[in-house]
Image (tube, rainbow, N blue to C red):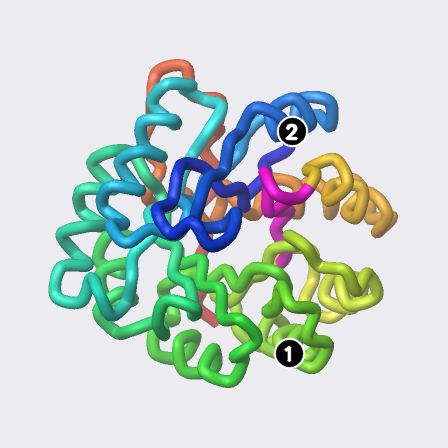
């Protein structure tokens, strides 16, 4: 089973770029099917009301049992004081993680505390701001932090190289492969941190899932290591919040400890 951990969905309300306008899934699903991707984790588009955006994406998940999972988006500043309420609603709707973006605001204790209490992993796009990961990882050793794009969708070589050190040192820090263009850095991340620290993501529907998947195939890993990246790592990280659903295609995985 191949799991794409990073695909956007739903409508935004910003109208300044695809990321806050619309993320239609029609073409993505055709391409994912052709590539053999069977489960996709959805992330809401940028929105001025993340409660509304989360409910829309949760509805997509509910409409295709077993095909999708989803993380809830929260805004660290605008949603301050009600993060636990928003994430509690998201969990009741079946969402299994938290998405935070540095372009909104920096990650906060409120979000980390809520994620810890609800046993949710945090996917935090740091936009190249790598150093604070040291603080998150040490202060919240029992929370899984997924840093997408190997730390920088903007292809910032220094940031991506720096993230590899955090992957190697912190058992609760992970990355995804979405949109990573410097292939040799993916090779280095797997070599130094190990395949258990890397997740396959496509950044669909904006990027082609088959093209992004080809990067994983090109790593030339042993089958067992490739399976970690293509789904097993995601299952382990999200084991806590996943709830059994009739007809779900997402299998249960063994418990995972982030302690040293």
Q: Is residue 257 above or below residue 255?
A: below
- Residue 62 in the image: x percent, y percent? 34, 23
Please report the bounds of the magenta region as a residue range.
198-207
The answer to whether residue 199 is magenta is yes
Q: Nearer the viewer, residue 164 or 8?
A: 8
SS class, disc 1 = helix
- Residue 37 in the image: x percent, y percent? 65, 29
Q: Quadrant of the N terminus?
A: top right
At horizontal 52% and vertical 47% (from top left) the residue drawn is 18
Other residues around mark 2 within 10 Å, as few (<14) / some (14–19) / many (≥20): many
Marks 2/1: CA–CA distance? 29 Å
Give the mark nearest the N terminus, 2 or 1. Answer: 2
At horizontal 71% and vertical 59% (from top left) the residue drawn is 180
- Residue 246 in the image: x percent, y percent? 35, 16
Residue that badge 1 annotates: 159
Residue that badge 2 annotates: 37
SS class, disc 2 = strand
Q: Residue furthest toward the top?
A: 247
Asked if labels 1 and 2 touch by Cβ distance under 8 angstroms, the answer is no
In the picture, measured across the screen, residue 256 lies left or right of residue 229, that is left
Q: Is residue 219 above or below residue 170?
A: above
Other residues around mark 1 within 10 Å, as few (<14) / some (14–19) / many (≥20): some
The quadrant holding residue 141 is bottom left
- Overall secondary structure of the magenta section: loop
* Pair 2/1: label in front: 1
At horizontal 12% and vertical 66% (from top left) the residue drawn is 81
């Amino acid at each position: 089973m191949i799991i794409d951990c990073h695909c956007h969905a739903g409508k935004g309300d910003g109208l300044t770029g695809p990321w806050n306008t619309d993320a239609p899934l029609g073409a993505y699903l055709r391409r994912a099917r052709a590539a053999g991707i069977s489960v996709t984790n959805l992330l809401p588009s940028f929105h001025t009301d993340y409660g509304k955006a989360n409910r829309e994406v949760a509805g997509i998940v509910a409409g295709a049992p077993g095909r999708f999972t989803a993380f809830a988006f929260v805004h660290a500043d605008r949603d301050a004081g009600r993060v636990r309420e928003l994430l509690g609603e998201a969990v009741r709707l079946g969402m299994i993680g938290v998405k935070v973006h540095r372009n909104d605001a920096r990650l906060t204790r409120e979000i980390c505390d809520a994620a810890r209490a609800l046993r949710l992993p945090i996917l935090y796009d740091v936009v190249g701001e790598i150093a604070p990961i040291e603080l998150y990882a040490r202060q919240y050793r029992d929370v899984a932090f997924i840093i997408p794009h190997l730390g920088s969708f903007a292809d910032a070589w220094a940031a991506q190289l720096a993230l590899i050190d955090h992957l190697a040192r912190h058992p609760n820090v992970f990355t995804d492969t979405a949109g990573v263009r410097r292939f040799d850095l993916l090779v280095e991340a797997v070599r130094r941190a190990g395949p258990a620290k890397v997740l396959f993501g496509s950044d669909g529907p904006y990027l082609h899932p088959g093209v992004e998947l080809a990067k994983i195939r090109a790593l030339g890993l042993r089958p067992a290591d490739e399976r970690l990246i293509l789904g097993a790592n995601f299952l382990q990280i999200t084991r806590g919040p996943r709830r059994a659903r009739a007809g779900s295609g997402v299998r249960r995985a063994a418990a995972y400890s982030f302690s040293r």
